[in-house]
């Protein structure tokens, strides 16, 4: 894959997160993960380590900035980069929905269709493992994460790809996964596509949603990607306002409507998030038989991953 300078510029203009810090993937034995990239003198660190110090308490280090050179190393398989999408003012240049598990293709397609119906351009990338995908939505300017997350969680729910009470959904999370920075870190990161070792296997690249085959010319595909305007995002966000007002206005009586039949039916209107999360955690629980079969390499067909007592 040819990496001309204008391609790198296009790449950076789309997958744009914090530029004062980025993350690198590491592997050690069976363990793997990401950590911020640092600049430091290895000889000074070795001396620090000989005195009983650790990298965590080593003070003579600073974060590496995300430059064209670092992107080129990512494309050339020197290292794999992850970017932190949540900027210091709690805005983002993009949002990505992560799908995995058995139904990831169907539910990613449902979300793509729902975005299209809303007039939002969205694009599907197959993940590093090949067993999941990311649906990317790019913004023309940075937009508050708290708003974009509400917009696209609403679209996910409307598409049927996600329910607050359904643990079997292949939808995993949104990037960013936070509305605001906590002050204790950078928020979650997302791995950049086009990492050469996985790209050469047909992963970490954009695919045709109908065939799930990689786009023939990835750089040409990036060139034609459309960004949604923040004015249009504001319009979508304002469209959520009536629902929010309805939820806030009805529980003023302090009463919760419960219907008893073959099922116990609770009105979701007015349920506080803490109670919603409690019901989700306590009334949908894992089936140990499924995970025993999976770990031992046995067939899990028709074995439920979760016992769902609530919908």
Image: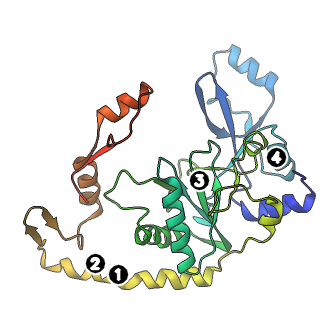
What whole-number distance in Å separates the C-alpha atoms at marks 3 and 2? Answer: 33 Å
Q: Position of residue 100 (x, y in %)?
A: 51, 49
Q: Position of residue 68 (x, y in %)?
A: 86, 53
Residue under numbered circle 1:
243
Return the disc, 3 or 4, that comes first in the chain's sequence: 4
Picture mark count: 4
Identify which residue, 35 or 303, lies in the foreground. 303
- Check residue 75 in the rendering and tell me which mark sits there, or answer none: 4
Return the disc, 3 or 2, that comes first in the chain's sequence: 3
Return the disc, 4 or 1, that comes first in the chain's sequence: 4
Residue 182 shows in this picture: no
- Check residue 247 in the rendering and tell me which mark sits there, or answer none: 2
Seen at 64% across and 38% down, the residue is 35
Tell me the mark number nearer the camera, choosing from 3 and 2. Answer: 3
Seen at 89% across and 53% down, the residue is 3
Q: Is residue 57 left or right of residue 152?
A: right
- Check residue 133 in the rendering and tell me which mark sits there, or answer none: 3
Return the disc, 1 or 3, that comes first in the chain's sequence: 3
Identify which residue, 304 or 236, lies in the foreground. 304
């Amino acid at each position: 894959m040819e990496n001309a300078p204008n391609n790198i510029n296009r790449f950076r203009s789309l997958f744009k997160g914090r530029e004062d810090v980025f993350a690198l993937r590491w592997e050690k034995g069976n363990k793997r993960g990401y950590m911020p990239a640092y600049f430091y003198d290895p000889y000074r660190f070795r001396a620090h380590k000989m005195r009983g110090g650790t990298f965590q308490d080593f003070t003579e280090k600073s974060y590496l900035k995300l430059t064209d050179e670092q992107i080129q190393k990512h494309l050339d398989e020197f290292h794999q980069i992850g970017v932190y999408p949540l900027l210091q003012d709690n805005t983002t240049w993009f949002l990505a929905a992560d799908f995995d598990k058995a139904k990831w293709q169907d539910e990613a397609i449902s979300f793509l269709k729902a975005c299209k119906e809303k007039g939002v351009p969205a694009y599907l990338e197959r993940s590093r493992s090949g067993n999941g995908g990311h649906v990317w939505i790019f913004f023309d300017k940075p937009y508050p994460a708290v708003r974009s997350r509400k917009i696209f969680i609403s679209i996910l729910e409307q598409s049927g790809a996600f329910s607050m009470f359904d643990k079997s959904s292949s939808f995993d999370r949104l990037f960013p996964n936070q509305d605001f920075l906590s002050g204790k870190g950078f928020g979650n990161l997302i791995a950049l596509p086009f990492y050469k070792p996985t790209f050469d296997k047909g992963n970490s690249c954009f695919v045709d949603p109908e065939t799930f085959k990689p786009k023939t010319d990835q750089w040409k595909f990036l060139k034609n990607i459309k960004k949604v305007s923040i004015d249009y995002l504001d319009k979508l966000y304002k469209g959520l306002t009536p629902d929010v007002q309805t939820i806030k206005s009805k529980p003023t009586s302090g009463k919760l409507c419960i219907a008893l039949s073959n099922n116990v039916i609770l009105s979701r209107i007015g349920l506080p998030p803490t109670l919603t999360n409690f019901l989700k955690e306590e009334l949908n629980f894992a089936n140990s038989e499924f995970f025993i079969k999976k770990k031992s390499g046995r067939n899990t067909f028709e074995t439920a991953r979760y016992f769902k007592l609530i919908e």
